[in-house]
Image (cartoon, coloured by chain):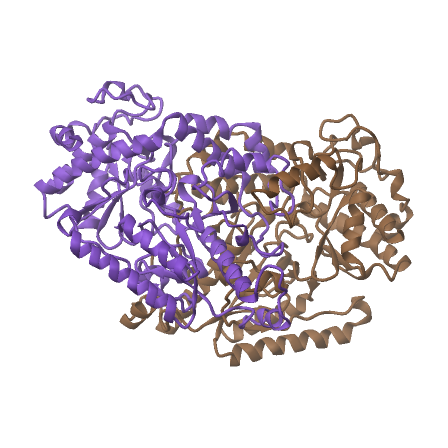
Chain colours: A brown, B purple
Amino acid sequence: MASLRAAARLRPVASRVARSSQPRFYGAAAAVKSSPPSGEQPFFPDEPAGPTVKTAIPGPITKKAIDDLHKVFDTRSLNMMANYQKSFGNYIADPDGNVLLDVYAQIASIPVGYNNPSLHKVALSEEMASALINRPALGNFPSHDWADVLRTGILKAAPKGLDQVFTAMAGSDANETAYKAAFMWRRQQERGGAHVEFSEEDITSSMLNQAPGAPQLSILSFKTAFHGRLFGSLSTTRSKPIHKLDIPAFDWPQATFPLLKYPLEEHVQENAKIEAEALADVERIITTHHLPPCAVVIEPIQSEGGDNHASPAFFRGLRALTKKHNILMIVDEVQTGVGATGKFWAHDHWDLETPPDMVTFSKKAQTAGYYFGNPELRPNKPYRQFNTWMGDPARAILFRAIIDEIERLDLVKNTANVGDYLYGGIEQLAKRYPGEIMNLRGKGQGTFIAFDSPRRDEFLKKAKNVGVNIGGSGERAVRLRPMLIFQRHHADILLEALEKIVKS
Amino acid sequence: MASLRAAARLRPVASRVARSSQPRFYGAAAAVKSSPPSGEQPFFPDEPAGPTVKTAIPGPITKKAIDDLHKVFDTRSLNMMANYQKSFGNYIADPDGNVLLDVYAQIASIPVGYNNPSLHKVALSEEMASALINRPALGNFPSHDWADVLRTGILKAAPKGLDQVFTAMAGSDANETAYKAAFMWRRQQERGGAHVEFSEEDITSSMLNQAPGAPQLSILSFKTAFHGRLFGSLSTTRSKPIHKLDIPAFDWPQATFPLLKYPLEEHVQENAKIEAEALADVERIITTHHLPPCAVVIEPIQSEGGDNHASPAFFRGLRALTKKHNILMIVDEVQTGVGATGKFWAHDHWDLETPPDMVTFSKKAQTAGYYFGNPELRPNKPYRQFNTWMGDPARAILFRAIIDEIERLDLVKNTANVGDYLYGGIEQLAKRYPGEIMNLRGKGQGTFIAFDSPRRDEFLKKAKNVGVNIGGSGERAVRLRPMLIFQRHHADILLEALEKIVKS
């Protein structure tokens, strides 16, 4: 039904992309109120009514600024230089006055819009100022109200069954500290419990980077996975060679991720077989690898690796295997977490019998860390899981404001609904342009939608010319990562832009 | 001279520690103006005149708060719970109304005082609000004014000869990204230059975590070094077993750090021999280790490892060795950087002929990363050194404000001067209590002063009762890490407290 509504509204994108001489941005006259044909109530009436493309992107002013920046800061991965003062809601502005609908959102990390007014207010509060200028070493000198900040923020959003947190700085160290917790847990089990002291051999060998103190154990990850780019996390990352080349790595194992065939409904039996084989591969590695895995880490949807999905049954099967072999299950929700899949946590879709052992988060949370529930995952002594800052209360306060905004606007539900609508629209497009939009995936997963394009990099470049900022993943996926405040009228603009691109 | 002045002023600490029924804090009536006997101009006239100890620490209110926090956040490493709203300048307050002179400063990471008025103003600015709520993926979507933020901030403070920066989140990832740059540089040299493409074998093996793509190379660090606690940085950390136990590590080598004998002037020849042997050990490892080092990483003063110093001649010798064998020198200034040693960067004391290849920073900078100058340290392709956030512009803006405050108050010079004064005072104390204050070190190194105590942990506990918050390092060092705004009148209070402790 949603798809029909979307299809009915597909019009050439030119009618919506204003090529005015004046950029439209936050506070500009043109408001979205007059725009949504659905009669939908906009979350932010001051948002631009649509994109404005004034110049080729990058334009002349931006090019000069890039040349200048490049002298001191590598800009070769620059996608688009932004003017954040002029960005608002779903729209990102650049120094040349271009304003694009942003469905990449800082690599899926902006949750509730640029210059979100509620966040702006919190950012200017005395509480935030104190957190910024009196940054504590959280493990040594936490603030008297840190428990309250956690309970009303990070822990309010905790996945079911996980009521404790270790805070971190970003996705990579969130994963690595979770891995450390897993290694300590495993060795503690091998020793016979928390009360058993380290042996002299453990102590001596650990200082030499040798076993048994530095144990011959591993973290099991999946092919095409992405878990970060520091040395431990990169050893579990298998996305692209450019991420890994020339960096020493631990000899940790990788299991086959089930690469499903689309459309799913036409490949039910085949996909079930693919998933069964992937689980068999996991079990084979757990039982035979020369560095026994103490945990398996997995993304609910492999994101950097190309937007690879698996079924809830696969994840339940994986959970069962970890239970059977007494290893931990770490769910990396760095990209999938905080509402984008139509659930607050993507693993909420799986209906697991027992929660994952640890869930890592970052990106849209604007802070990072890992959740856990089992008290045995607290190391048996202090200072084993520790560093100077252990996160950032300023960013924790921001996450609390983000959670409030998600609740206020019911954004997880919004993402589920608008995601269905957008998926339906793209499905129609895919039928009309089957050679251009392939392997559409993410049905029922909110706005966490992707498809393959035979000319992906060209596709992404053209998107900017028609007023939309879109990202890619893997070798040929176009990945959509709208913010949680993405609504139907934005979906309409996006659908028109997609049609314009594939037609060109 | 300074030492005589200090000695003359040693009075029982009780006269200064107020045991009033009212806590003194920011905005309270008691101001420091009436206090400094030296007639010194206080940087912050509203600072408390001295510590206030009202209860045992932790007091009853704090104990309850710790119990509550412990349910959701591990508090076993908690040193003191703080009330940052009531802390000011050099003084940290707790929920029970105790106010301590803080010479630990969040593990050496608070540069210009709690609730510093200049930083407070910047924290409440629109520029800061935008940086907080519009957090960019810096490598993809930098702000149009990012070059300006860098040049007027992080790069304004750049070590001589290093004019580029890669920004990071904290000390661990600052070091690990520097290590990654070193590995990529080395492999590029082995391939024959930036223009030479990766081989098919490199590409394939990197995805399997195997050589040559994941090379059999290493980073050389020193015994008792500390460089962080993620997997790569922890492999170079050799401080304490509790930091390393149960965590897999790379089989990277460690060289002997010269453990000098004190007082230095009585062990000149012996120490020269110790340093020569340490350099010989470095050269032996560079030329013979089965995983060839592509870089050596070193702290100017080993901090977590016990405040171990070496002479400028040693560091010049190390630089010469790295040049001779064509490996990189990474100076880890995470704890020593930003003014505390009486120079902005501690390695400024060494008078090197060529700058280090990379210098890492964090802590007092309140942001992190590594500086470099050689363009070859930019990897030959984009996305090799990359992650989503690549630092935090909000924290970069704060560092800019910190640099401005350091300049406004001439704080590096202040630290040099007050450090000499404090050192002299402790030297006198050490003569009077030779069994209690041993191996005093840090002469001419600003306030980066430490000494050994035979009952160190007891010493640190007693310090709180006499109104001072002090940290330790290594097995028995008392390490002083005052902020840059620490003045003579604070030194007098500290000296009195130290005497009270050693006398008790």
B299 sits to left or right of A346: left
> From this viewpoint, is residue B504 visible?
no
Residue A269 versus residue A240: which sits nearer the camera?
A: A240
> From this viewpoint, is residue B18 visible?
yes
Locate residue A480, reporting x and y percent: 73, 52
B267 relative to A192, above or below: above
Locate residue A230, reporting x and y percent: 51, 58
A409 relative to B202, above or below: above
Locate residue B83, reporting x and y percent: 37, 35
What residue is drawn where x is 71% and y is 77%?
A273
B246 sits to left or right of B473: right
A432 relative to B13, above or below: below
A394 sits to left or right of B4: right
Instruction: Say which quarter of the image contains residue A429.
Output: bottom right
Work out which residue is located at the far left of the displayed protein and give it. Answer: B432
Locate residue A108, reporting x and y percent: 65, 49
A376 relative to A98, above or below: below
